[in-house]
Amino acid sequence: MSKKLTSRAEDYSKWYNELVVKADLAENSAVRGCMVIKPYGYAIWEKMQAELDRMFKETGHENAYFPLFVPKSLFEAEEKNAEGFAKECAVVTHYRLQNDPDKPGKLRVDPEAKLEEELVVRPTSEAIIWNTYRNWIQSYRDLPILINQWANVVRWEMRTRLFLRTAEFLWQEGHTAHETKAEALAEAKTMNNVYATFVEKFMAIPVVQGVKTESERFAGAEETYCIEALMQDGKALQAGTSHFLGQNFAKAFDVKYANKEGKQDYVWATSWGVSTRLMGALIMTHSDDNGLVLPPNLAPNQVVIVPIYKNEDQLSEITEVANTIMSDLRAKGITVKFDNRDTQRPGAKFAQHELQGVPLRIAIGPKDLENGTVELARRDTLTKSIVTLNELAVTVEELLKEIQETLFNKALNFRDTHVTEVDTFEEFKNVLETKTGFVSAHWDGTNETEEKIKELTKATIRCIPLDMKEEEGVCVYSGKPSKGRVLFAKAY
Amino acid sequence: MSKKLTSRAEDYSKWYNELVVKADLAENSAVRGCMVIKPYGYAIWEKMQAELDRMFKETGHENAYFPLFVPKSLFEAEEKNAEGFAKECAVVTHYRLQNDPDKPGKLRVDPEAKLEEELVVRPTSEAIIWNTYRNWIQSYRDLPILINQWANVVRWEMRTRLFLRTAEFLWQEGHTAHETKAEALAEAKTMNNVYATFVEKFMAIPVVQGVKTESERFAGAEETYCIEALMQDGKALQAGTSHFLGQNFAKAFDVKYANKEGKQDYVWATSWGVSTRLMGALIMTHSDDNGLVLPPNLAPNQVVIVPIYKNEDQLSEITEVANTIMSDLRAKGITVKFDNRDTQRPGAKFAQHELQGVPLRIAIGPKDLENGTVELARRDTLTKSIVTLNELAVTVEELLKEIQETLFNKALNFRDTHVTEVDTFEEFKNVLETKTGFVSAHWDGTNETEEKIKELTKATIRCIPLDMKEEEGVCVYSGKPSKGRVLFAKAY
Ligand SMILES: [Zn+2]
Ligand SMILES: [Zn+2]
């Protein structure tokens, strides 16, 4: 807690890593690439979960749970999906350990307990779920199936970073089955829209909605909708994806239904997910050189009260005032904590709450007791004011709303000033090198150009925005004709 | 839905398996021993989770998340724990698949991608967590640590049954660290008490609180507290356990703290868990030959309204009434669903809701519209009554409370009449064979006797009840002296 964070300007990546650990959000574990999500970080994730879960249920979805393991023969059934994930699969090959005859007190894998068929630890659950849906679907009466799962998944990554890219992560994955292509497409769009609403309104992070190019699509999808956010270092972050899977999984797992006329047809599918990666987006969008900045919607404690006292008498008077404040705030649905730890001085508490991004801090000292006031400090602007006790609850309520809005508007302003239209490849490279952010440019629609640009600049097409204007132009790289601008950026 | 369930009298085990599947709670998956928890079953589990989570937080615990994988070298560090779980471990040995050169379109484990150290899929998380706690704990100021985790775990079981024993299951595991033995012991007892309260008040299942004998203790524990319930077939079911782990894990992972005097000492530990096994207890305690019976606290829908109509006019009138009823009930915090599916007849809906254990069913037909009444049916007693609309909301509210109590009292009565004191081994065997249930008998306190009784009768010591009376006696098997009665039973 004592040492200051590395500043963003000095080393953005180091700033992020330090912040995650020092703010008690997460840390690396003894397992390569797997993180420990600490209580404070998990409390923020729980708030995300609760709101998303509410939104999923409001849109007609139910939760269920499918196995962690996918037998290899099911995993490989949908070829593109299998190919896309094969290189990242953790594989269970044995089901027993035994005493190691050569090393007393140590265990080894029991060679006799080899599985007949290897089990893949799910990197995503389409295969196991569509193999299950086959038995659930006979006719149109069984459709749609609108299911979500909260789960852990494993994708073996070589270079990992806390929250942003970890071998194991937590997520939700929706898996839906529909009668028609139109219905499945509508579902995929609806859920992408749910994500956009959640990330903008709840997390205060502006996003661009779009579709992925073929090369960036989910393995096995026919269309991938996405929401793309922009971090403070000018790199983009894919915050959520929603896939129209066509009939690919239905065909791979032979899932047919009888329509009203009794005719058999393959079922149409979607899947969609967001993960603990959102924690990374949250941190990198709002935080500053003093630490985490949390939108009030996501703060485990929206307000913290710190007593400043010299003796027990003062503390007991302050405690009385604090109790009244807490009951007033809680009556308004505001979460508040009285930090009366006697193991820490006020200065250390201030530093900790600042580092952990508590939106509002109330300090109460002897002078305040005399004057019927408190000192109120905003985490986002780092400004302080003196507020009378009778105005306090209303002020706090208004300020929390204001902070939520301010953070969104600040991030929106940053994002909007970092979308740059360019018409030449020189400009393109120049913007990426100096200004950073999204580059809005014409593209000829080919994989080759996309690949070449990536090679030369490390920028990828983040999305073809849903609200793209039709505009005749020429590709920024190849000079071939184009009908509209797409968004390029370097990305997490 | 058409065929009736096998009756309990006919084949209890078959009845259970059929009920779980037909009531849409869970089913077997393509992965050996792993289940799919279907939306209706998962909705019940979510209700359990929400209440438990509330109780954990109320008692000062926070949630966190630790890795799914445990490196073998950490897993084997606490020897007894490792030994206890070694035979049930799913082991990840590789981190990549590749195209199988011999079988086009198929994948195989990439032999080049062998892990240097195997990873155990967590059967329980003490090892990975205590390895983490080492870095979190320096002094008494860092204690206690009161953490809970909601997670999936894997224990490779040869004979599995839905919810009762599955290779993968969902659970929560609390892991706490304390300064003193007394504090850790108190925590273990507190959490066992939380479980007892939850299972009795919320799930309407009476339990006996007790401690396990040495042979039934959790591997690595010094004392295992438990709650034991009795199923309708007279077999016991361990519904939750809370372990006092002494300093075993602290020593294995070298977790020391400096006390107020600066002296270093090992930390004291507890762990405690309940799992989706509780779903099995729920089903087997309350359900009947018509299907699931749910305590109102756990019912995803506490009330269902079924319209009975011959034409659209009638349906629209009924819908109006149903809407009023729903808003009245929802205002009282009661969950209610209007089952207006036009793909099912009322009879089929009645059968389904009965099978799925909806506590109260309201039917509204043309006669009811005339009379301003509805038909109200109780799932637990299968009784029906006519209720006027203006009495309905209050009646429903009272009945839901009554059903919750009735179910508990019925189960309590069954349990109490199935605890039989015996003083000879003949009686002991006779009760187990004919009356079943708990047998309360003197035991000489030795492993040998316990083992021998298990061999001869398949009954185990379920627990030494916390409220055991001191009573001089002689062991029912060995004739050696004993100071009190313990509870034996055949168990799940
Ligand atoms: Zn800039
Ligand atoms: Zn009986």
Image (cartoon, coloured by chain):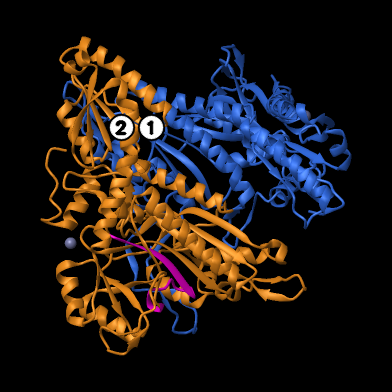
Chain colours: A orange, B blue
- Residue situated in front as seen by the camera: B249 or A452: A452
Quarter of the picture containing the N terminus of chain A is top left
2 and 1 marks on the same chain = yes
Q: Quadrant of the C terminus of chain A?
A: bottom left
Q: Give the image quarter of residue B390.
A: top right
Which chain hosts label 2?
A
User: Residue B21 placed where, x, y %?
Assistant: 70, 52
Question: Residue placed at 63% from the left, 71% from the top?
Answer: A180
Taking the image as drawn, is residue A149 in sight?
A: yes
Residue A228 covered by magenta stretch: yes
Chain under disc 1: A
Q: x%, y% of residue B12? A: 76, 43
Q: Considering only vertical position in the picture, is B400 above or below B471?
A: below
Q: Is residue B233 magenta?
A: no
Around disc 2, counting alpha carbons within 10 Å, would you say few (fewer than 14), some (14 to 19), or many (20 or more)? many
Mark 2 = which residue? A303
Q: Is residue B30 left or right of residue A276?
A: right
Q: Residue at x 61, y 27 (%)?
A: B200
Q: Which residues are magenta?
A: A214-231
The image shows residue B405 at horizontal and vertical percentages of 69, 24
Kind of residue at badge 1: Ile
For the question of whether residue A231 can be seen, the reply is no
Of A303 and A251, the residue lying toward us: A303
Point out the tag, 2 or 1, that comes first from the N-terminus: 2
Instruction: Give the residue pinned by disc 1.
Output: A334
Secondary structure state at the residue bearing disc 2: strand
- Decide: marks 2, 1 in contact (CB < 8 A)? yes
Residue drawn at (52%, 59%) of the image? A174
The image quadrant where one finds ligand 1 is bottom left
Along the viewing direction, whichever of A118 and B314 lies nearer the viewer: B314
Picture quadrant where residue A278 is located: bottom left
